[in-house]
C-alpha cells in the first residue's frame, strides 16, 4: 500500500524518535500515577459510575470526579460536566463567570481562538450577547517579533488600565494561529508577572495541553484553566463535555454561570455519563502519549519529505497539535483527505472546505472519529486562508496515528 520511500522514512523515523518516545512514556507514567493516586485517595467505587437523573442532587460520582480533576491538575477546585457542549461553551462559562460590566479582559497571547472572538465581541458590541454587549472591554498584547511573550507590553497595559483588568487571558496552544505553544513553565512566568502587578484572575485556555507535560497551569499559578472533554482529558472515551479548574472562588463564580447563582455545582444530573468520564480521565495520560508520538512521527516524515512542519520532530511539546505550512490550498486539502481516508469511521468520504459556524473563513476538517468532532482521535483541519496551514492532532493509538500519517504523506507526495 505504501511506497518503498515512505516505508523507509517511516522506519528511520522510529529509530530517530526512540529517545523522544521514551521521554513521552515517562511523562505518561508520571501522569498516570497522579491520576491513579487521586482515584485511590477519593475512593472511587462502582456506585459512583452510574449517576443520577432529575436535579442530580448528591451525585457522588460527579462530586468525586470534580475533586479528582482538581487534585490531578493541582487546583483547589474544579467541575467537569458532560452537559457542557464544547470547549467554547466551557470558556464562555468561565469568562462570563468572572467578568462584570466595566471590567476588561486582557489577552496576552494575541487573538483568542476563532470561536471565542464572537463570545468576547472583539469586533465590538452587536446585540448578540457577547461580553462587549455587557460592557466588558477587551485589550490584547501580541507576541514580540521573535514570537516571545511581550512582558513589557503586558506591564504597560496593566499599569495603563489598572484594576479594570479583571481577567488576563492566556491561550496555551497555538489554536489556528501560526505561533508557538506555551510551555507550562512559561505560563507560570506570566502568572507570577501578572500577580505581582495586578489582582486580575489569570485564565488559561488549556485546550489540547492536558497531560502533554507532567503538570498543568493551575499548578504554577493560573487561577483558572478550561478545556474540552472531546480533546485530551476525555481520553477518547468521554462523548461530550468540558471542565473548569482553578481557585476556589474562581471556580465557584464559574459554577454560578454553569447553572445559577447560589446553586452552582450542587445540581446537574449525570444521566449515566459518569462511567465514561471516569474511564476517559483514567486513560487520558496514555492516550495523550499516543497522540504525541503520532505528532512527532508526522513531523519527522514531513520534514524528511521537504515540508514545513512545526514543531520540529525533535522538539518537546506542550500540546498535541502538529502544523504543516503548505503555502497553497491543495496541499492542505489533500493532506486532510489523506488523514480521513485512513480513519476508522467514514474512511470513504472526502472532506471538503465549508463555512463552519463560529469561524471567519471556510474550514476543512478530516474527522473520521467515533465521537463526532473529537480531536483526541486522529483529525486534521485548517482554515482556507494564507498561509494554508494544516493542524493535525490526535491518534487514539500510535499505530493507527502512524497509518493515518503515512496515508496523508502518500497523498501529498504522489501528486507533486
Ligand atoms: C478546541 C479549542 C477550543 C474550543 O473549541 P471547541 O470546538 O468549542 O471545543 C478553544 N481554544 C482552543 C485553543 C482550542 O484548541
Image (cartoon, grey):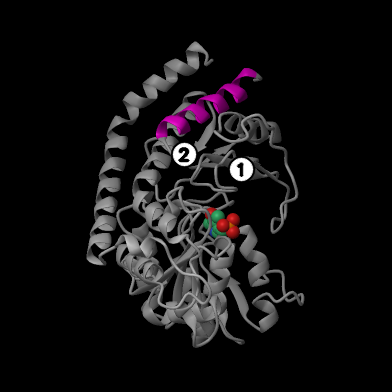
Tell which circle, 1 or 2, labels the residue nearer the N-terminal end. Answer: 1
On the question of residue 209 being in view, the answer is: no
**Could you say which quadrant of the image residue 384 lies in?**
top right
Viewer-side residue, 369 vs 327: 369
Q: Is residue 328 left or right of residue 377?
A: right
Point out residue 296 in the picture as x, y percentages from the top left corner: 41, 36
Q: In this rendering, which labeled residue sits more in front, label 1 or label 2?
A: 2
Query: Residue 204 at what x, y percent from top left?
Result: 46, 66
Is the C terminus in the top left, top right, bottom left or bottom right quadrant? top right
Q: Residues within 10 Å of mark 1 (few under 14, many from 20)?
A: many
Judge from the rendering whether residue 76 lies leftward or rightward of residue 171; answer left or right. left
Residue 188 position, x and y percent, is 35, 65
- The quarter of the picture where the N terminus appears is top right
Q: Which mark is residue 395?
A: 2
In terms of secondary structure, where does tag 2 sit? Answer: loop
Query: What residue is shown at x 61% (from left), y 24% (from top)?
Result: 411
Mark 2 Cα-neighbour bin, 10 Å: few <14, some 14–19, many ≥20:
many
Q: CA distance from mark 1 to mark 2?
A: 14 Å
Mark 1 C-beta to ligand 1 under 8 Å: no
**Residue 281 covered by magenta stretch:** no
Please state which of residues 67 and 97 is positioned toward the viewer in this rendering. Answer: 67
Tell me the magenta residue range.
398-414
Residue pictured at 37% horizontal, 21% vertical: 12
Label 1 element class = strand
Front residue of 248/42: it is: 42
Query: Which picture quadrant has residue 202?
Result: bottom left
Q: Residue furthest top?
A: 4
Q: Residue at x 37, y 80 (%)?
A: 248
Q: Quadrant of ligand 1?
A: bottom right
Q: Position of residue 9 (x, y in %)?
A: 43, 20
Determine whether 362 is above or below 351 in the image: below
Amino acid at each position: 500500500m505504501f511506497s518503498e520511500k515512505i516505508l523507509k522514512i517511516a522506519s528511520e523515523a522510529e529509530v530517530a524518535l526512540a529517545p523522544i518516545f521514551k521521554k513521552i512514556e515517562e511523562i505518561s507514567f508520571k501522569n498516570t500515577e497522579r491520576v491513579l493516586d487521586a482515584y485511590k485517595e477519593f475512593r472511587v467505587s462502582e456506585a459512583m459510575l452510574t449517576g443520577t437523573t432529575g436535579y442530580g442532587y448528591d451525585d457522588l460520582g460527579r462530586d468525586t470526579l470534580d475533586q479528582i480533576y482538581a487534585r490531578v491538575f493541582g487546583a483547589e477546585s474544579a467541575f467537569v460536566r458532560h452537559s457542557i457542549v464544547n470547549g467554547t461553551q466551557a470558556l464562555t462559562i468561565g469568562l462570563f463567570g468572572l467578568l462584570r460590566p466595566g471590567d476588561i479582559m486582557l489577552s496576552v497571547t494575541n487573538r483568542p481562538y476563532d470561536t471565542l472572538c464572537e463570545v468576547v465581541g472583539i469586533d465590538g458590541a452587536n446585540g448578540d450577547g457577547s461580553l462587549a454587549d455587557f460592557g466588558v472591554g477587551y485589550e490584547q498584547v501580541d507576541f514580540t517579533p521573535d514570537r516571545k511573550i511581550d512582558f513589557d507590553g503586558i506591564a504597560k497595559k496593566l499599569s495603563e488600565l489598572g484594576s479594570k483588568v479583571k481577567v488576563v487571558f492566556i491561550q496555551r496552544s497555538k489554536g489556528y494561529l501560526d505561533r508557538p505553544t506555551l510551555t507550562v513553565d512559561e505560563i507560570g512566568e506570566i502568572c507570577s508577572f501578572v500577580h505581582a502587578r495586578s489582582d486580575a484572575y489569570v485564565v488559561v485556555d488549556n485546550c489540547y495541553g492536558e497531560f502533554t507535560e507532567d503538570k498543568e497551569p493551575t499548578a504554577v499559578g493560573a487561577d483558572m484553566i478550561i478545556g474540552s472533554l472531546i480533546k485530551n482529558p476525555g481520553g477518547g472515551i468521554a462523548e461530550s463535555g468540558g471542565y473548569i479548574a482553578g481557585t476556589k472562588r474562581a471556580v465557584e463564580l464559574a459554577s454560578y454561570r454553569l447553572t445559577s447563582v447560589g446553586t452552582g455545582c450542587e445540581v446537574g444530573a449525570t444521566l449515566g455519563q459518569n462511567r465514561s468520564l471516569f474511564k476517559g480521565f483514567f486513560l487520558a495520560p496514555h492516550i495523550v502519549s499516543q497522540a504525541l508520538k503520532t505528532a512527532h512521527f508526522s513531523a519527522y516524515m514531513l520534514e524528511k519529505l521537504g515540508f514545513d512542519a512545526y514543531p520540529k520532530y525533535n522538539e518537546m511539546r506542550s500540546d498535541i497539535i502538529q502544523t504543516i505550512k503548505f503555502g497553497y490550498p491543495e496541499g492542505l486539502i489533500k493532506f486532510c483527505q489523506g488523514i480521513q481516508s485512513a480513519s476508522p469511521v467514514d474512511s470513504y468520504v472526502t472532506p471538503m472546505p465549508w463555512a463552519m459556524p463560529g469561524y471567519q473563513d471556510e474550514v476543512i476538517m478530516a474527522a473520521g472519529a467515533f465521537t463526532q468532532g473529537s480531536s483526541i482521535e486522529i483529525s486534521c483541519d485548517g482554515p482556507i486562508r494564507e498561509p494554508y496551514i494544516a493542524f493535525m492532532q490526535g491518534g487514539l493509538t500510535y499505530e493507527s496515528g502512524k497509518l493515518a500519517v503515512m496515508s496523508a504523506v502518500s497523498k501529498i507526495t504522489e501528486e507533486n
